[in-house]
Amino acid sequence: MSARPALVLSVAALLLTLLLLPTEAQAQWPRGQGNGYVQLGLGLAGADRGFDGDRNLGPLGSEDNPETYSEFAVYAYGEVGITDRLTAIASTFLRSSVAENMDGEFVNGGLSDVTLQLRYSFPQIGPLVVSPQVGVRFPTGYDAEDSPPLGSGEADLLAEVQFGLSLWPTPAYVGGSVGYRQRGGLIEDEILAVLEAGYFVTEAFLLRARGDLTESTSNEIEDFSQLGLPPEQGFLTLGPGVTVVLSERWQLNGDLRWTVSGRTTARIVNGVVGLALVW
């Protein structure tokens, strides 16, 4: 059998998880005690190209044995205000993925990792809000040796600082975050950054643009290997999104994302449609 097509899965899973999160227009502001946000989303991802250790784009897998990857996922994300400034966050997802090369088809599916986080929002300074957030992501009992894997099988720790800036009276905002992910096992730690801008065309229709950057703290791997989850990787994704406010409580979100640059990672094209309940 050929090497396991695991690298693509790890990137697709992370990007689709990012797409499910609330927009930066909502994420940094405190929910308030007893208030909440729950979203269910459907995601699709695919790739047939990848970036090597020198950030050169080429076939996924190898020239002699190229690979393709596709994924369908169902995501759940929720927030609830514990106090006026402290918010609890939980997320998880079910995934069905298929990777193919000249040696055959690799299929796997099931429940992936669960992430639990806490966010504290400092008192707002004019139009600016700053919110530190910490959390842990842990496996749910799946076999990390299955191909494609549902995750690394290791627990990760995450710390980040989020910010949101209202541009009122212009109906727009800028938001983002910087963070650090301590990876479990043999995977190198990662530095994270997000930047998003949004404009309310009407009170019920929000246009968004977002970029996500993940970069490993190590830069030693040169070759693109499919033997397992990469011990280090980096990628930059860009794409648009829309939010439609259906009612006081219901929202419809849609996002597309492209991996435009990376290192030992797949060039993913993915999208998510989510229905959110706010109270």
Image (cartoon, grey):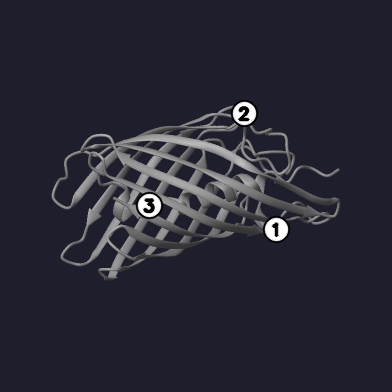
Which of the two discs, 2 and 3, sits closer to the camera? 3
33 to the left or right of 259: left
Q: Is residue 95 visible?
A: yes
Q: Residue furthest top?
A: 185
Quarter of the picture holding the N terminus: top right
- 197 up-or-down from 20: above or below: below
Query: Which three-letter amino acid code belongs to the residue tagged 3?
Result: Pro
Residue sitting at 56 percent across and 28 percent down?
A: 184
Element under label 1?
strand
Element under label 2?
loop
Q: Which residue is mark 2?
A: 186
Going from the N terminus, do you reach mark 1 or mark 2 first?
A: 1
Q: Which residue is mark 3?
A: 22
Disc 2 residue crowd, few under 14, some 14–19, many 20+, Cα 10 Å: few
Element under label 3?
loop
Residue sitting at 69 percent across and 33 percent down?
A: 143
Query: Which three-letter amino acid code belongs to the residue tagged 1?
Result: Gly
Quadrant of res 85: top left
Callout 2 touching callout 3 (CB < 8 Å): no
Which residue is at the front of the view, 73 or 127?
73
Which of the two discs, 1 and 3, sits closer to the camera? 3
Which of the two discs, 1 and 2, sits closer to the camera? 2
Q: CA distance from mark 1 to mark 2?
A: 26 Å
Going from the N terminus, do you reach mark 1 or mark 3 first?
A: 3
Q: CA distance from mark 2 to mark 3?
A: 31 Å
Disc 1 residue crowd, few under 14, some 14–19, many 20+, Cα 10 Å: some
Q: CA distance from mark 1 to mark 3?
A: 33 Å
Q: Residue furthest left?
A: 126
Q: Which residue is mark 1?
A: 58
- 31 up-or-down from 46: above or below: above
